[in-house]
Each structure stands twice: as structure tokens, then as C-alpha cells.
Image (tube, rainbow, N blue to C red):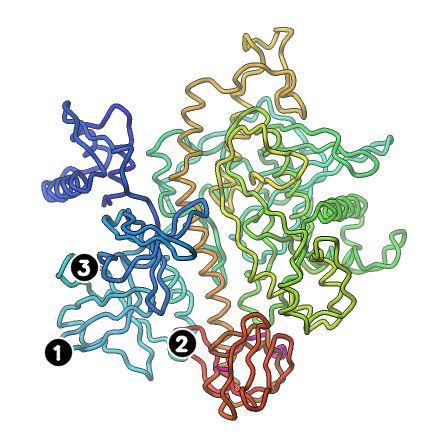
Amino acid sequence: MFSASTIIDNINQEDGLEYNKLCRLLKISKKTDQDKLNIALLALEKLEIINKNEENKYTNIKDSKHLVAKIRCSSKGYCFAVRENTKEDIYIKENLLNHAWNGDKVLVRIIKEGYRRKSPEGIVDCILERSNQILLSKVEIINNQAYAIPIDDRILAKIKLPKKDEKYKYNLEDKNIVKVEIDMFPIGQEEGLGHVIKELKLNKNEKLDTEFVLSKSYFNNLKNPNNIKPKDIKKEKRLDLSGKNSYMFKSWKADDSPILPIIQIENHKDETTKLWIHTNAIAERLNLNSKKSLEIFSDRFESFPLLNRWQNYLNENIINISKFNLGEKNEAISLCIYLNSENEIINWSFHLTLVKCSLIVENKHTEALLTRKSKTRITSRVLKPIKEYIEDLDRILEIATEFRKSHLSKGKIEISRTLNHIESLDEFFVCTPGEYSKEYFEALSNTDCQTYLSSILYEADFIWFKHSNKFGLKSAAYTSKELDNINLSEIIKYSELVGNNLELNHDGNLTFTQILDLCIDEDKKRVLNKLFINALIDNEVKIILDNSDINHSENCIKSPWTLPSYDFTNLINQYNVFNMIVNGKRSNKNNKNNTNYINIMEMDSDKKVNWEIYNSSMKKNMDLLFNNLLIDKINEYKNKAKQYKANMKSIKQVRKAQNFIGNIYNGMIFAVQSYGFFVEIPDLNVEGLVHVSTLNNDWYEYRSRQNLLIGRKSKKSYKIGDKIEIKIVKVDILKYQIDLELI
């Protein structure tokens, strides 16, 4: 089904678009769908968003006063239209939303400019795209009529249900939430219509947790695309490295987890080293050269863990044919990094290869390797079976460690992951290599070998950004922010977590590492880590063009390509790597016998090239992949996946706490708000809220600058880092909330 957004996107052509061609692009053939399209086109014309020219072709109005934004609402009823590129948000009054809901993509018109610290005000003129067609709701009877009331209190609407759905009326004992499909969204004075498609009785029924959390995160269509047919790969003209040992560092337990690259090492007598990163040749097996081929990925852009398996964005056929199976030859797209004796990168080159995985390195192996007392004697029962590989593995771990030291010396930060005590969530707590949405590294860990793989892939992904950017090629990349220094005013809020030996630089700042070093207590250090993680803003994928102003030495931009089975960003970047290897122009005459023939896949080869690497057809193909509309969808999907993973952790914490209602524990305050404070219970590894209304002995005032609650009479205060005794009194599955009381 089409939306206003797809109409506008398809009309976005300079020469205009005929009505019949628009119908073909939108796959509209039925008379009823054409009627709906005609109404939409007329409305967009009246809103002066599109125009019909003298040739009866539709064009977008370039100087339209409308702004594209997404609606973000709070539970308190405040709504804003959020724009891209950190532009100022636009405040939207509830009566000017025109039935737009939280998450909807809209066209907004500013009706009142902002001044001083006030945001501009606007009105929603057009809903471009609805965030979801299915809502999790409670069924309530209002004036003898059944309504679906969304459990997401940011959605300011109710949906009228048919008489037969009265049987799903909400029962507190069952906690029977329903999934409601929208048949008609509210229009003008007309109420929205829908019907119940499934009931979820959540009370004491953990089997429904995954479906509930997925639905609450607006994942409702997760069937894998089964119609992707892989292309055959040519084995000739590939560098055969299958006779050398290669290693997969794998912490994920599920058999269907994303396919990890394999690492190969070559040590030379002159103390130089070749470090090979072999990635699965997925992009080489797919057709990504038309809009039709990209439609397969229209609503799935990332793989993420469920509880006992993974939800993959690629189909099973593609995954199975691309796997690095132990002891089997397979095709790869590879990067060779040349290192000197100081583990510094002195050269690199990209290749199409044939490789063979010799060993799957597990956490037990890295833990045994990194904790053994002597490298000369092997006594561990874990290491004896892999004795022939130990020298290679030691060298790979050494390089990964040196890479990480180099990253930290350039101002990057490292934070240890929170320990997990809920077995069903193990897969959620494994480091995802090549995931750069977070503004920090997960600390290298003996018990998670993927942290070491992550250190190596960081260099590989940075190398591809540098290589492609110097040739003027587009890439999908993450750009890091400068986080080396943290202002003193922020530390004052957390002063109870750190020591008193503050040594500031001349700007009155501390480095992140210095702050952690001043925090001696391990419990407080864990809370401090959590505070900084929550304070950091996630990075989004962006399209990076040729930019001479970019400082390549800053190591701040990564174009991930090494995990194409993990997400679509890796896939399109790997597709670019593959096409540069196969289709990149090597000389002015494109003749291998020409004296100007250059290996464009080597480091610094751009200095010898003064011609376009891709022809016009290849450029057009890349423009199709690397465009802002597609990148917006990727970022939106990644945000949903992030929310799902956080919510899955929360609901499992609530399920665990449900078994200990009434128990008393020692906890530590890790966040303070005007309505209460959040407490971590280390014994259970769960977090709960002490609401200010339960503090009956005084009237408590919130002081935001000091980040504390203080009693007006008693002067008793509650602040971050305080250790207190609490009792679990209640849990709320629907809100993922644990309620605590002071003892």
C-alpha cells in the first residue's frame, strides 16, 4: 500500500512524472486504489506540496514551506516535530497534530517563530507515513462501545472496535493485552477503526514476552525474505589462501547468529606482519542494482537476537551459502593489513579470495590464553587440543590489544559491559563487532573474544572509509564526536562517586579515563559507567561524500563493511568494496597492458589516479544505494532494534524481580529525578524506582544542579552513589517497572 511519503518520493524527478507511470511505480491497478491515489494527489496539490505542470506531469514544489519531521510525544502530552541534522525541534499543540501519532513522519508548517529559549510552533499539514499499522492496547468499554486504548501513553488516541471484540475487555489478573490492526486512522471528526487480531495474556506467561516486546517496539512483520536468490560466484581469479590457517572469534551461542569474519596472520622474518580479515562474500551474491531488488529490504535492515535464536534480515538460503564452515573452502572479500614491528599500519590491499576456517575460537580459549602464566609451557586442558594454533592466536590477540591502546591514546573511551545474571539474555550481552552507534568501546574482555575481534574490525572499517573517500566514492558511515574531556560541572553532580584528587587541565576539564581512575569502589564505578552510557548520544548512519576537509588521521569515521550479515549498512559498503575490485577503472584506457595500469585497491593508489573510478552506469547504481531516503529508513529501523533490545532486558529483569516481591536488599542509587530515584540491586542485577510519594517522613525537593532529593525539614538527602536498604513491593510487566520502598 502506498503512503503520501512514497508518492512524494516517486514524484521527485526534475522532468515530472505522468499519472500512469506513477501508478506503475506504486503498483496500483485496482480502481479503488486509483481513487485513493487521486484523493491523495488532490490533497497534496492543495497543500502546495506537489504541482501538475502544463504537460499533466506531477512535480514536487521545491520552495514549499513545509518541513519533513517525525512526531515525538511524551507521556505528559507534549509533542514536537523533530527534524534532521540537529535543527531546532518544532512544538506542536495537541489540537494541531491533525491525528498524527508518536513516530509518524509528517510535513510541518511553522506558524509561529521561536524566540529566546522558546521553540518555534507549528501545525501538521500532512502525515507522510504512519509508524505502525498495529497497536498494543487494552480493551475498555466506554458508553457501551468497545475501544482499544494504546498502552503506549505517547499515542493520544483511542480506536473504535467492533462489538465482537468486547470479549477482550482488559482483566488485571490476566493482563490480557491485545494486538489491534488499524482499519482506518482517525480523520477529522471521524474516530479511528480497528479490530483485534490477537490476545496476549501476559500474567505469569513468559513465553509471550518476545512477541509482546517486539510488538511494543513496533516490529510486526518479521518474516524473512524468502525470494532472494543468490547469484553464482566465479571462483577463478581469486587469491587462494585456503591452505593457511584462519580463525573465527565467536562468543555468540546461537547457530543462526550473524556470520563473523575470519582472521589470518602471516609473520615474516623482518618482523613485519600481514593481518588478513576475510569477510563473507554476501554482497557478491546479491543483486543490488535496481529499486525492485531493494524492495526486498524495505522493512528489515538489521539482525538482532531474540531469546534462543536470531531474527535475521537476510534469508536462510543466503546465510547458509555464505557461511565459513569449519574446514571447508569458501569465497571471501578480504583486506590485507601490513604491519611493521611496532604494529603500525604501513600498507593495505583488498582482494577476492578463497579461504578456509581452521578453528572457531571460543571464550574459553581466549580466557586460557590470556590468563596462563607462561607462553612456553602449555598445561591447560583447554589449550592442548589447539596447540598448533596457539602462536597465531597469541599474535592476533597482541595486535588487537595494541590497536585498542592506539585508539584510546587518540581520545576514544572504553566502558566495561554490565554483567548479566539472567541466562536467557546471554546473547544480548555479547559485544557486537563493527557496531558504531555507541560513542565508546566495550572494554576488551577475556570472557568475550568478540571484543578482540571488534578492535581489529574497527581498523578494517576505518581503512575502507579512508580508501573509498580518497577516491571520491560514497560510503555509509558513522562519525564519532569528540569525547575526550568532560566538563567539571557534570562531575559535581556525581561527586560522591569519585575521589577528591581532581587534577584539572587548564580548561577545567578531566579526561574520561581520569574520572574512572578516581572511582575506586567497584559498585560506584559500575554506576558511573551506567551514567555516562545513558548520557552519550548514539551516532546515526550518514552518507559521506568526497570531502577534502575531512582529517583522515583523526580515526573518527568508520564505514562498516566486515559484517554484511549483521545489517544493511555493512552490506552496501561491502557491495562498494566488491564493485571497486571488479569494476573499478585501473587506467585511463582501461587496458591492463597499458603502462598506466594501477592496482587501485592498494593504500595510497589514489595519488596515482586522475580519472573516475566508476563509469556512469556504476555511479547510478551507487546513487541508488547511497541515498538519504534509504539511510533514514536504516536509522529508523536501528532505533527500533535498540529499543527492542533494551525493553527485552527490562522485561526479563521485571520477571526476575516478580519472584522476590517482599524481599529486602541492599542497593545503590544510580539516578535521581523529581519524581523519585532509581536503585540498582547488585544481588539480582535489576533496577527499580523508589517513588517520591513513598517518602512519607518529609516533603522532598528536587535540586537538579546537585542531582539530589532533599527533605525540607529533615534535610535528609538522596543522591547518586548512596547505598540504601530497600524492599521490592510491586512489578508492572506492561511498563517494565519495578517499584521499591525504603526500609
Disc number placed over residue 205 in the picture, else none = 2
In space, the residues marked 2 and 1 are separated at their CA atoms by 31 Å
- Please tell me whether mark 2 sits on a helix, a strand or a loop: loop
Residue 37 placement (x, y as % from top left):
16, 41
Q: Which residue position holds label 3?
A: 186
Please give the range of residues in magenta.
Answer: 681-691
The CA distance from mark 1 to mark 3 is 20 Å
Measure the C-alpha gap from mark 3 to mark 2.
34 Å
Residue 22 appears at what percent x and percent y?
A: 21, 32
Q: From the image, give the main secondary structure of the stretch colored magenta.
A: strand
Residue at mark 1: 144
Q: Amino acid at mark 2?
A: Asn
Q: Of label 1 and label 3, which has the lower sequence position?
A: 1
How far from the left and from the top, in percent, is residue 294? 37, 37
From what the image shows, is residue 281 above or below residue 215?
above
Q: Considering the numbered disc 3 on the image, is that residue within a helix, a strand or a loop? A: loop
In this view, which residue lies farthest toward the bottom?
Answer: 697
Q: Image height check: is 551 above or below 86? A: above
Q: Closer to the camera: disc 2 or disc 1?
A: 1
Label 1, secondary structure: give it. Answer: loop
Label 3 Cα crowd, 10 Å radius (few <14 / some 14-19 / many 20+): some
Instruction: Examine the rendered structure and indicate whether residue 550 appears above or below residue 691.
Output: above
Q: Earlier in the sequence, mark 2 or mark 1?
A: 1
Residue at image position (17%, 38%) is 45
Answer left or right for 735 relative to 277: left
